[in-house]
Amino acid sequence: MNEVPGEAMRAVARAYGLGEPAGPAVYAARGELGRIWRLETGRGSWAVKELLVPAEERGARGDTEFQLAAREAGLRLPRPVMTVDGDVLLDGRWRVYEWVDLAGGEVVSGAELGAVTAGLHQVGHPAWGPADPWFSEPVGPAGWEALAAAGGEWAAALERALPELVALDALVIPPAPESLTTCHRDVNVENVLRASDGGVVVLDWENAGPARPAWELAKILVDLSLEDAVAAYRAYRVADGPETLAEPAGFSMAIAEQGHLLEFYARRALSPEESEDNRARARARLRTMLDRPLTPARIDALLAAL
């Protein structure tokens, strides 16, 4: 549903001190966790994010502090807006940013992605807690068994990939607590986009949290083609990125997240309680992931190329 009640948006405008809406909010985009609305008021243009999964203020405040530190360090991102009471969230469902005009249809290069990642890792913002199991713990035998038994149109592809997916779990090691900083944890070509004026802007910070930067770098590289991954890594190092990759265990974060994403999308695709839009998006994600899963051979090939 690409509309939101006017009274809800007026409540958001009042809570964040945005000014009186000049008209209805316009649907702009959506991701896995939220929808973006463009709201025009007498004070400017705003990106109002409607969270599809309710959030907690503590986590939102943590990612906002990281965003502000990144802006201070020179990274380009939409400025987060606080409520007039000093909160990040309204009712656990809404948050607001300044609007940034994007260049439609353009994809940033691997080199640009690597340079942005170097800037993010130079921030060195302290972690506010331990690593989330989503990013640090493998699915495990019971999880893979349940996923294989769940069925679905992707079952045959999953069955073919399963031996290597299980083998990957053996590579995962927990990150040392002292190695953690706050990381974006969702850097990719969907969240690093070109602005209309030609600059590069980093979006979707709600997933930020404690992680090991080197392992985030590995996670970013495995989403790219081998050629783009090499270009990204070189650009990262040229831009004084502080991390290196030298062993398969450095891909622990990528391995853990791949498994949990496959679980998440399978549950969503099969759930009768989800909207057809959510189920269709989940099926598409599963097809994409299982067409080119991360495997031990891919990790070896990437390490050799780097």
Image (cartoon, rainbow, N blue to C red):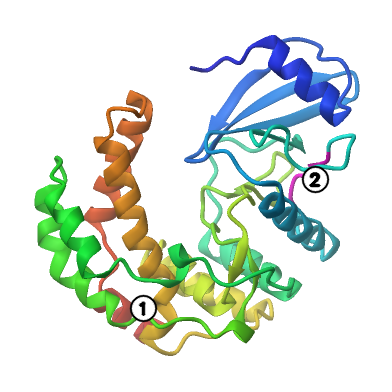
Q: Quadrant of residue 28?
A: top right
Check disc 2 and report the residue beneath it: 79
Q: Is residue 147 visible?
A: yes
Establish if 254 lies above or below 301.
above
Q: State the extent of the magenta-drawn residues as a range.
A: 77-82
Question: For the stretch drawn in magenta, what is the main secondary structure?
Answer: loop
Q: Residue at x 57, y 49 (%)?
A: 191
Q: Nearer the viewer, residue 209 or 188?
A: 209
Instruction: Specify the amino acid type for callout 1.
Output: Leu
Q: Is residue 284 visible?
A: no
Say how many tags the image has.
2
Q: Quadrant of residue 186?
A: bottom right
Disc 2 crowd rating (10 Å Cα; few below 14, some 14-19, many 20+) is some
Which numbered disc covers residue 302? 1
Q: Residue at x 51, y 66 (%)?
A: 132
Q: Residue 290 vs residue 149: left or right? A: right
Q: Quadrant of residue 183?
A: bottom right
